[in-house]
Image (spheres, rainbow, N blue to C red):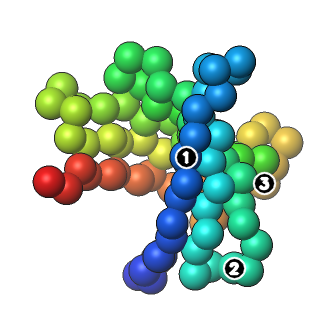
Amino acid sequence: MDFKVLSLEIVGYDPTTKIFPSYVYSNMGESVIRYYWDVQGDVVTHWTEGSKYTGRFSEDGNVLSGGWRPEKREKKTPENTYDAKMTRLK
């Protein structure tokens, strides 16, 4: 959509649930957004209330490709329905 998102995400680990809760501070709004991460092998699930990202790491582990999709009860919007590719910078 041709805009730049600037954000800081602080990620922790919860040994009880074995997931990674996180807080995101961004230029897209004034509120802090709560997210969760789960990594099982090369599959990554990342979600917040109403939508979920599912992606897979490349063989070398440097690229994560996948997409955000709304939960079944949610309406599809440009904010919750898109593909994303993340590349590790060295």
Q: Is residue 69 visible?
A: no
Element type at marker 3?
loop
* In this view, the mark in front (3 or 1): 1
**Residue linked to disc 3:** 75
**How far is the residue under mark 3 from the one under mark 1?**
28 Å
Marks 2 and 3, Cα distance to the nearest angstrom?
21 Å
| Circle 1: element type | strand
Q: Return the x and y of residue 4 as percentages of the image width and height.
A: 43, 80
Which of the pair 68/18 is nearer the observer? 18
Mark number displayed over residue 3:
none
Say which of 78 and 10 sits in front.
10
Check disc 1: other Cα within 10 Å, few if <14, some if 14-19, many if 20+.
Answer: few
Q: Quadrant of residue 53?
A: top right
Q: Which mark is residue 29?
A: 2
Q: Which residue is mark 1?
A: 11
* Mark 1 vs mark 2, CA separation in Å: 19 Å
Q: Amino acid at mark 1?
A: Val
66 up-or-down from 8: above or below:
above
Residue 14 vertical placement versus 28 (above, below): above
Q: Nearer the viewer, mark 1 or mark 2?
A: 1
Image coordinates for residue 43, horizontal then vertical, percent? 42, 25
Identify the amino acid type marked 2. Gly
> Left or right of 12: which side holds 4?
left
Image point 23% across, 50% down: which residue? 88
What's under tag 3, amino acid-wise? Lys
Q: Can residue 56 be seen here?
A: yes
N-terminal of the two: label 2 or label 3? 2
The answer to which of marks 1 and 2 sits earlier in the sequence is 1
The number of numbered badges drawn on the structure is 3
> Residue at (46%, 31%) from the top-left corner?
44
In the rendered image of this protein, does residue 82 appear above or below residue 31? above
